[in-house]
Amino acid sequence: MGHMKIFLDLDGVLVDFVGGIHRAFGKEYSYNSAPIKWNFFEHWSPKVHSCDINRACTVDFWANLDWMCDGREILRKIDEELDVSDDLFLLTCPMHNPQSWTGKRLWVERHIPHLVDRLIVTPAFKGIFASDNAVLIDDKDENIAKFVEAGGRGILVPRPWNELRGWAGRTLEVMRNSLGEL
């Protein structure tokens, strides 16, 4: 196998988008008691329309999001387990609000500046990057399934909102094992 390319998702893996959006709307949120659906916002009462959520996701919203509780450690594990410094890319999907592109870039510039030239922000299907030598690390079951279907490999990061929710408290252990199998 040739050089392995690692595509690392931002939101829900490194960046706490869900906590940020809850704060933006003054909603209670705890990572450990997050609803088990990706679309948390369906559970809000009164309901907040997706247009309002999109509008709230400004440059400042994105630029000022927190790290996920274990985001730094996930990045460290990838560095330790794999020698991919030249083959690690951040792959993230923007929201409809065009400010999300700039805000995500500013977050990367602020927190992991050495990866800013490895940031790919695209609404395109992540599977276009799939190949025998490509691995997607993501928190969405669907993204991993489609990437694998397109010919790549995937590592699902355990989160309360995906099928590995039972392992969400042991994410670093799962990541170490998954990375070790590559």
Image (cartoon, rainbow, N blue to C red):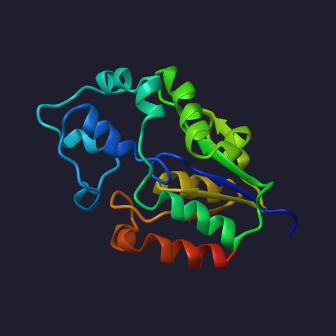
In the image, residue 82 lies at what x, y percent?
Answer: 72, 69
Residue for point 23% across, 39% down: 42
Q: How many labels does the image show?
A: 0
Q: Residue at x 47, y 56 (%)?
A: 139
| Residue 111 position within the rendered picture, expressed as x and y whole percent measured from the top left | 56, 44
**33, 146: nearer the viewer:** 33
Place of residue 8 in the rendered image (x, y in percent of width and height, measured from the top left)? 61, 53
Q: Which of 35 and 71 is in front in this view?
A: 71
Using the rendered view, name the quadrant where residue 41 is placed: top left
| Residue 152 falls left or right of residue 35 | right
Q: Quadrant of the N terminus?
A: bottom right
Asked if 154 appears above or below 140 in the picture, the reply is: below
* Residue 168: image location, x then y, percent: 37, 68
Could you tell me which residue is drawn at 42 percent across and 54 percent down? 68
Q: Is residue 26 above or below residue 155?
A: above
Q: In this view, does 178 lie to the left or right of 117?
A: left
Which image quarter holds the C terminus? bottom right
Task: Find the residue positioned furthest to the left.
Answer: 46
